[in-house]
């Protein structure tokens, strides 16, 4: 789906591409609805969907984390229905892709957690260095 709707071939789905995708899936959205769809999974706040963020939609849907009336819920549901028209072979590859998407999303979350831990560690080290420097300063001041 992602490559199919990435008309600009830039590796992202922007607002207009998402609009076309939702129209083709039979669930057109308002401009605000589309913006909210992107906002819900736009982790890098660039106002467009990367492949990683797109995969996050399906992970959230599988985990029941999407509002029933949200555009993302409709996108996840309609993508599955869309698959049934492709038959068993299409469904098999879709679910394999979906399983891979969930694995990718899990790995992405682990990477984010690791980055956050590293930042905390660096902040703590900086705090300790500043405290040691102040101690040193006060020792010289006496």
Image (tube, rainbow, N blue to C red):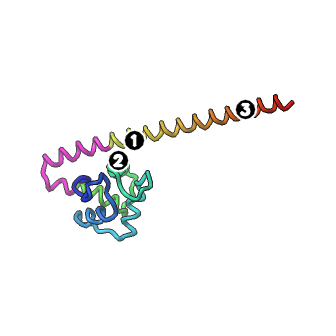
Mark 2 and mark 3: Cα distance apart in space: 43 Å
Residue 2: percent from the left, percent from the top?
26, 53
- Please rate how many residues cluster around mark 2, counting C-alpha atoms within 10 Å: few if below 14, some from 14 to 19, many from 20: some
Circle 2 residue: 52
Q: Earlier in the sequence, mark 2 or mark 3?
A: 2
Q: Are marks 2 and 1 in contact (CB under 8 Å)?
A: yes
Is residue 96 left or right of 39 when viewed as pictured? Answer: left
Mark 3 and mark 1: Cα distance apart in space: 37 Å
Q: Earlier in the sequence, mark 3 or mark 1?
A: 1
Q: Residue furthest front?
A: 140
- State which quarter of the image contains the N terminus: bottom left
Q: Residue furthest right?
A: 142
Residue 127: percent from the left, percent from the top?
66, 36
Foreground of the two, 51 or 101: 51
Q: Main secondary structure of the magenta part?
A: helix
- Give residue 108's mark: 1
Which stretch appears magenta? Answer: 81-101
Is residue 85 left or right of 29 when viewed as pictured? Answer: left
């Amino acid at each position: 789906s992602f490559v199919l709707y990435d008309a600009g071939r830039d590796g992202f789905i922007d607002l207009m591409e998402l609009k076309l995708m939702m129209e083709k899936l039979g669930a057109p959205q308002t401009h605000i609805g589309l913006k909210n769809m992107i906002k819900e999974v736009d982790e890098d706040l660039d106002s467009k969907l990367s492949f990683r963020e797109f995969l996050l939609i399906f992970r959230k849907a599988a985990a029941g984390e999407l509002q029933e009336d949200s555009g993302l819920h409709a996108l996840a549901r309609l993508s599955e229905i869309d698959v049934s028209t492709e038959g068993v072979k299409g469904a098999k590859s879709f679910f394999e892709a979906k399983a891979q998407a969930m694995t990718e999303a899990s790995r992405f979350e682990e990477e984010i957690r690791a980055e956050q831990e590293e930042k905390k560690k660096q902040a703590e080290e900086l705090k300790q260095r500043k405290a040691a420097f102040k101690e040193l300063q006060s020792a010289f001041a006496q």
